[in-house]
Amino acid sequence: MSSSRTARERVRAELTREITDIARGQLATEGATGLSLRAVAREMGMVSSAIYRYFPSRDDLLTALIIDGYNALGEAVERADAAVPREDHTGRWLAVCHAVRDWALAHPHEYALLYGSPVPGYKAPVDTVAAAIRDTVVYGRIVSDAHGAGVLNPPGGLPAPPASFGDDAGRVRDVIPEVPDDVISRALLAWTGLFGWVSFEIFGQFNNAVLDPATAFEHTMRCHAALLGLPV
């Protein structure tokens, strides 16, 4: 019975993987709003009722794709950070930035699912949170390590965060621990700057304007590192 159950579990895992692979292809052709369980079943040669045993609704399939996407991005960021010496905080930041951009360029439709327009009627469940913050946790560790090592030296003249930012900083401190509010404020500036650039590039906002995006990206991420206070 145990062997039979294992075989069934293996078949279920393979079919689940095939469903999500086909659904990712639909993202490229139809977009997230056009994702259809019936169309996936048709491509697999399954009756539409059978696919509902794996994903009871389109939203369940969307959630699986979102979790897979966040995990893939998180794994790419974790590998990039692990490849750089721990004391090279600027190198770790730049490696993470390039990992995000490289993954987005290689998987533009999955990036659009994660960071593009919300899918009408879909509300992401809490199941997505752990995967969604994997890359942020890595970034937070870099900032915390740099602060702990005493290497953060931001340029002068930057305004202090407003008093109302204190509560927000407290929540962000869950992923960027043991740093003061001003460091968290600058860390948010750098992190959102990274994803702002990548989103502009992925969604074509730089077309006919930035003709050497790779070089401009490197320069911009170094500028963000300097604003954060990392040595550049």
Image (cartoon, rainbow, N blue to C red):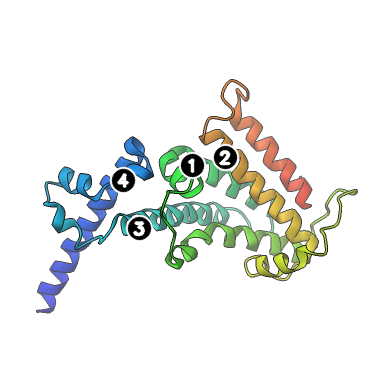
Residue 186 x, y percent position in the rendering: 75, 54
Query: Which disc, if any, is residue 64?
Result: 3
Q: Position of residue 25 (x, y in %)?
A: 30, 41
Q: Are marks 1 and 2 in contact (CB under 8 Å)?
A: yes
Say which of marks 3 and 1 sits in front: 3
Q: Is mark 1 on a helix, strand or loop?
A: helix
Count neighbours of disc 4 (C-alpha within 10 A) and say few if under 14, some if 14 to 19, many if 20 or more: many
Residue that mark 2 sits on: 198
**What separation in Å lies between label 1 and label 2 (alpha carbons)?**
7 Å
Query: Which is more N-terminal, label 2 or label 4?
Result: 4
Left or right: 132 as drawn, with respect to 196: left
- Residue in the image at 65% along x and 37% along y: 218
Residue assigned mark 1 = 104
Question: Circle 2: is it few (<14), some (14-19), or many (20+) Cα within 10 Å?
Answer: many
Residue tagged 4: 35
> Outermost residue toward the top?
208
Q: Residue 225 carries which label?
A: none
Give 34 or 115, whichever is nearer the viewer. Answer: 34
Q: Which amino acid does label 2 sit on?
A: Val
Distance between mark 3 and mark 4 Cα atoms:
13 Å
Report how far apart the C-alphas of labels 3 and 1 lie in the structure: 18 Å
* Chain-order first, disc 1 or disc 2: 1
Say which quadrant the N terminus sits in: bottom left
